[in-house]
Amino acid sequence: MTPASPGTPTSQTRETGADTGAASSAPPSQIRPAAIASLSTALVFGAIILAVVNSSGWPAFKRQFLSQRAFERALPEVIRGFGLNVKMFLIAEVIILVFALVVAVVRALPGPALLPFRLLGTLYVDVFRGVPTILVIYLLGLGVPSLKLQGVTSDPVFWGVAALVLSYGAYVAEVYRSGIESIHPSQRAAARSIGLTSAQSMRYVILPQAIRRVVPPLLNDFVSLQKDTALVSILGPMEAMRRAQIDAAGNFNYTAYLVSASCFLLATIPLARFTDWLMRRQERGAGR
Amino acid sequence: MTATTDSFLDIRELSKSYGDSLVLDRINLQLNRGAVVCLIGSSGSGKSTLLRTVNRLESVDSGMIFFDGQEITGHHVDENQLRKRIAMVFQSFNLFPHMTVLKNITLGPRVVHGKPTEEANQHALELLARFGLEGKAHVRPDQLSGGQQQRVAIVRALASEPDLLLLDEITSALDPELVGEVLNIIRELKDSGMTILMATHEMGFAREVSTKICFLDQGSILEEGPPEQLFGSPRQPRTQQFLQRITEAGRL
Ligand SMILES: Nc1ncnc2c1ncn2[C@@H]1O[C@H](COP(=O)(O)OP(=O)(O)OP(=O)(O)O)[C@@H](O)[C@H]1O
Ligand SMILES: [Mg+2]
């Protein structure tokens, strides 16, 4: 968006001017801010690039991190590994959406009979929001298989996903809960007054409204989950990060890490932009 | 005190506190079938709380409520069945914003009473037509005026074919020019024989439609009687004061 120019009367005309983006056909008063913006951007970025390229360590850095040969060698491997990240992300995401919803609903339902479940829910959320995700992955991925329980898998991908579900489930449950609590109590009273039970009120009246409200923050958590699948590499499965590690260690060259980082960026940036867009749209809609 | 009663709704010695503050103080109130009883009184006098205890949105501390001969404050009472017969409309409409008008109205009949969707829709459309809302079935509440929203809320309350209607200041959130269309509905309901217990600040309307007026003050019914008597020659000084203030505010 172009900065406010003194000549434009309302914010609305300013927005339409920026949205159509027709700088050439814009009135003269709008050309100048646009020009200033491009110039200052070019200057700042140019200065940063110059400083980096002229630093004394640049040639060494270029060899270590930006080697074309290493890039070509690592790319197919890392991409193949990233497939596993995507798979872990998708599986974890679906389970988290359902599991966290159950936790949030249990915590929100009234009634003395549900007290133990409410306590359990609270305990779970407190514990798993407090423990770093990487520790949960270690504890589950190394701890459980070392117990050598009969019939229990020691597959690192399984335990990695389980750890991500437990860790992120706690956050997502809180997001759901804030959504549930943001619905005015009068909605519940109205639902109860037409004869719905607490559970039915939740199902037909509260949750549909609450979930709509929390979609942007949920997506935000999933942006973060997407990249945190890399943490599972500490258990050894061949995902993008692990493959990059192997390539880097075998060739004394870190270019593979940049390849891996690019994979994550390419996946998270669209989701992050989409989330921002949704949030802005909801904020605009909230006034209605 | 006997368990049997001739009144359709019979509230006896009902008390309720929030923490230390006594909100309802030994309320006694009887309604016959087809009666229209108005609760008046200043803000905080307990009108809403009294209404909410009748369909069990609030619990009570002591006292009893009999509805159609049955005690309804105990634990054994199936409140969802009860709410089929006692419906409530709120000051702030409380329509469900994520549903169309039609879905708002049919939710109760479909989910609670297991009515087939076809039948529930049919009934809802008839009610909408009866209250001048034809054509509004498929819009969302936020596309309606306040008066239309409140009429939809009344239709939603009527969809379960209740025997008693609780109305909590249903015109207070409306622009003055929209009040009339809602009050007309209440008149029509009264003429069709509906039993109504309502809290209101519309004194002219209360005077016109009520069979009985109750003046609530600090949680107790200080004075009650037919409208001519209560508005014409109130006995209690506090009732006189209240009506005086209302008259000065130009609402009588
Ligand atoms: N949930 C609650 N917790 C604590 N106190 C409450 C609660 N609801 C109502 N009260 C108190 O109970 C008293 C009666 O409130 P109530 O809403 O029944 O009054 P009212 O006559 O309906 O007033 P108004 O005309 O403003 O609607 C007030 O003093 C109010 O502050
Ligand atoms: Mg009230």
Image (cartoon, grey):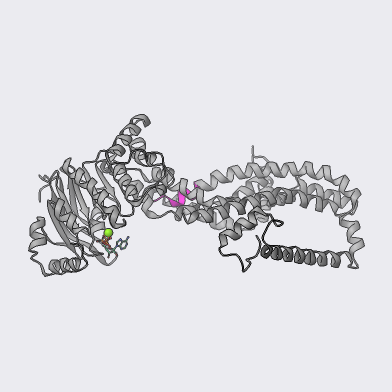
- From the top left corner, tell me how far across and down residue A145 is, in percent: 68, 45
What segment carries the magenta color? A102-110
- From the top left corner, tell me how far across and down residue A243 is, in percent: 80, 47
Front residue of A49/B51: it is A49
- From the top left corner, tell me how far across and down residue A87 is, in percent: 69, 41
Q: Is residue B149 left or right of residue A48?
A: left
The reply to whether residue A111 is visible in this rendering is: no
Q: Is residue A108 magenta?
A: yes
Ligand 2 visible in quadrant: bottom left
Residue at 30%, 46% in the rendered image: B151
Q: Is residue A81 above or below residue A10?
A: above
Q: Is residue B74 left or right of residue B98?
A: left
Quadrant assignment for the N terminus of chain A: bottom right
Residue at 61%, 54% in the rendered image: A276
Q: Is residue B4 left or right of residue A90?
A: left
Front residue of B214/B12: it is B214
The reply to whether residue A176 is visible in this rendering is: yes
Q: Total of numbered circles in the picture? A: 0
- From the top left corner, tell me how far across and down residue A174 is, in percent: 53, 54
User: Magenta residues: mostly which secondary structure?
Assistant: helix
Q: Is residue A8 magenta?
A: no
Front residue of A262/B169: it is B169
Front residue of B152/A159: it is B152
Residue at 53%, 56% in the rendered image: A283
